[in-house]
Image (spheres, grey):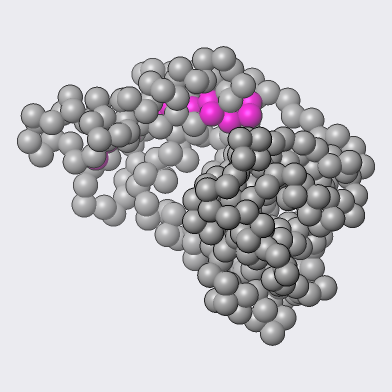
Amino acid sequence: MGILLFRPTVSLAQAQKPGDLTEESALPKEFSLENGLKVCLFPYSRPQLATVVLGVKVGVADEAPETNGHLHLLEHCLLFRQSHLVENEHLYQTIKEFGLYYNGHTEQDLMLFEICLPLEVLLSGLDLLKQVVFSFNITEEALEKEKKVLLKELLDVHRDPQKVGLAKAYELAFPNTGYALPVYGQEEVIRKANLSQLQGWHQKYFSPDNSALVVVGKFSPKDLEESLKQIFSDLKPGGKKVSRVPPGHKSLNPSQLVELKMNVADTYLMAALAGPEYNNPDRIGLDLLSEMLGYGLYPLLYSAFAGQTDLVSSINLHYLSHDRAGFFSLFFY
């Protein structure tokens, strides 16, 4: 399988001139393909770039301690080690030629694949993303090479006080659940992972009916919808519906204090609290509150310490809402 990059005779960028998005074509559009792939299109009147995110409903919270790291490793291999992508350095030449932003992220509930590219090659980028996410062409040799890359990444993570502290806080907030597992995985699990294990994850979760596609750019949703049908409709839906059980976590014990020693110059303090999940009606208000307290030009939390010279260098407040749980973290240093 190869990657085909093409320039349409009339590109999506040329089909509409700057400023001529009609009121109807400027509205977001949501729909599902017959194979179950959920699609959301966001027309955006900015220069000739488009952003595409393809999310698969699987994350670290679906792992167990003995498999923690499989999904992060799978993400790396899909992006950078598939035979049809690396043959003759085709992927890297494509990125170099068209200036693509190309990356992926494994999170608690989702695996996300992202590209940002010139609008005129959007259709080719969508086809590339399809080949990355829904194909599994990984050799044993490629797997072992990517393990080395990922293990080096883990060394960097273990040197970062904020990432180490956040992982420990999740472990304390959600004991005995998938949310307690580190998103980067565990070194020993990654070393022992084999190709059949990764393929098992891919076969179970990487189907269009367990995925969602978001496209942002200057295009006509009606025209792009037809193109998406041509590109993605040949994908087959999964054999069975994937269901999730909410974690039966307990709230953090307010008296629980953990001290971690690291070879760093500063002292860091983190406080954490379990919160409401993404679909909880309180989420919107909590998003706004965390924005007021911890973000913007004048975050209120940092302002409270502004007169205390050299007491605090930085304060970060985050509210992270997941599919089955939520999480507050307050980080000082």
Residue 76 sits in quarter: bottom right
Using the rendered image of the protein, determine whether residue 184 is visible from the camera's viewpoint.
no
Farthest residue in the bottom direction? Answer: 88
Q: Is residue 257 above or below residue 91?
A: above
Q: What secondary structure do most residues of the magenta stretch adopt?
A: strand
Q: Is 16 in front, or is 67?
A: 16
Residue pictured at 90% horizontal, 37% vertical? 240
Residue 246 appears in which quarter of the rendering?
Answer: top right
Residue at image position (37%, 55%) is 159
Residue 200 x %, y % = 82, 53
Horizontal and vertical percent for residue 65?
Answer: 64, 43
Quadrant of the rendering where the C terminus is positioned: top left
The N terminus - image quarter: bottom right
Image location of residue 126, percent across then percent down: 71, 58
| Residue lying farthest to the top in this orientation | 281
Q: Which residues are magenta?
A: 321-333
284 w.r.t. 220: above or below:
above
